[in-house]
Each structure stands twice: as structure tokens, then as C-alpha cells.
Amino acid sequence: MRVEDLPEDRHTLVEDAMAMLLGTLFVALGVTFYTQAVLLTGSTAGLALLLNYLSGWGFGAWFFVINLPFYYLAIKRMGWSFTLRTFIAIGLVSLFSELTQGWVVFEGLPSLYAAVMGGALMGIGMLMLFRHRTSLGGINILALYLQQRHGLRAGYVQLAIDGVILAVALTQLPLDRVAFSVLGALTLNLIIAFNHKPGRYIGVS
């Protein structure tokens, strides 16, 4: 039987709420690994981490503020339901990332372990959110909008923005931290690439 012939499996409200809660907790824990090891990731979260290192504001505050301008694009492209879910998820990651820093403290955290484990946790958390029609907004929405409106490839836009973030990071962080950050980003993206494929998961929200 082909995947498209299978009956639609719609998520319940409880399932959506559980996925959003656990997904954002996973992402927040991954961010905690990164902040305590002074590492970066890509997209909006990477920009928030970089600004966190350069200012007195925490990651959660920066992450919430940076995403504010992108809600307009989310409404235009994805609709109100997706935007509301994304707004709640971003708010939860912002809150949980601040709380988790007080709940979990690492001593002597190896950068290699932090990069791989932090990237894996964020990748798994984002995968849970994606499967319940939720995102963490920001640059991903901008890339999709520019592709739809101006024909710019979303992947190239995302890559260019992440490249700028990485270039700035090279002026502010030691080279080894940037190298570990690249490894963590690779881990995150491989988890999503291997598991978030058309037809592999048919549940809808």
C-alpha cells in the first residue's frame, strides 16, 4: 500500500500540546549545552546565542525579540494557526531556555560532547515541532517567503545568513568553538534530514 493511500491520522489537541511542550524543552536543553560550552548554531537561534555572548541579555530574551518581525511573514505564508503555534513555541523556548540554565549546571562540559548532544537535542525537539505543524520561526520563514515571492532558493538564503552569523562568530569566538559549532549544526541538520521526509510521517495537526 502506498503512503498516499493510507487514511489521514489527525493529531488530537493533547498530542499537539504534549509535542509542543516536550519539543521546546528538548530545544531549550540543547541551547543550555551550547550556552554553557559557548557554542553557536545556525538560523535565529544562532543569532540569539551570538547576541547573548556579546551583550548582557540572555538567550531567551534575544530569541523572542528577534522573531517578532517574522510573524507577519508567517501569517501571510502559513496562516494564523501555524503562526499561533509558532508564537507559543518560541515563547516556550525563550522561557525554558532561561529556566533550564538554573535547573541544569554542567561542570567541565567537553565541547565535543556539548556540540553533538546539544545539536541532537535541538534537532529532535525541532523534529517533534515540525511534525505537529509548528516551527521556531525567524529566518526559516524569511527564506521560504523570499523563495515564494522573489524566486530565491530558500536553502541558499538560509546558507547565506548562517554564513554571515558564522563569519561574525569568527571575530568573537575562538576558532575551536566555531569548529565545534559547525559539528553541532551538522548533527542537528542530519537528524532533520534523515527523519523529516515526505511520506515518512503522515500525522497531521
Image: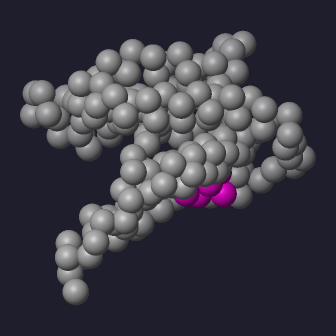
- Residue farthest toward the bottom in the current orientation of the protein: 1
Q: Give above or below for 176 relative to 65.
A: below
In which quarter of the view is residue 40 placed? Answer: top right
Q: Is residue 191 above or below residue 107?
A: below
Which stretch is magenta? 117-124
User: Going 90% across and 47% down the picture, which residue do you hit?
Assistant: 107
- Measured from the top left, where is residue 186 in percent x and y? 47, 55
| Residue at far left of view | 151
Query: Which residue shows up at 39% across the image and 30% down it?
Result: 83
The reply to whether the magenta stretch includes residue 89 is no
Q: Position of residue 134 (x, y in %)?
A: 43, 42
Name the spot of residue 185 as percent of width and height, x first: 50, 49
Q: Which residue is located at x 28 percent, y 72 percent?
A: 7
Quick check: is 123 in the magenta stretch? yes
62 displayed left or right of 134: right
Q: Is residue 30 left or right of residue 36?
A: left
For image coordinates 48% across by 28% down, the residue present is: 87
Q: Is residue 23 visible?
A: no
Left or right relative to 13: residue 56: right
Badge count: 0
* Magenta residues, dominant SS class: helix
Query: Which residue is nearer to you in this view: 168 or 12?
Result: 12
Q: Is residue 54 visible?
A: yes
In percent of width and height, residue 50 lies at 58, 26
Q: Nearer the viewer, residue 14 or 53?
A: 14
Q: Is residue 173 left or right of residue 133?
A: right
Q: Quadrant of the N terminus?
A: bottom left
Coloring applied to the structure = one colour
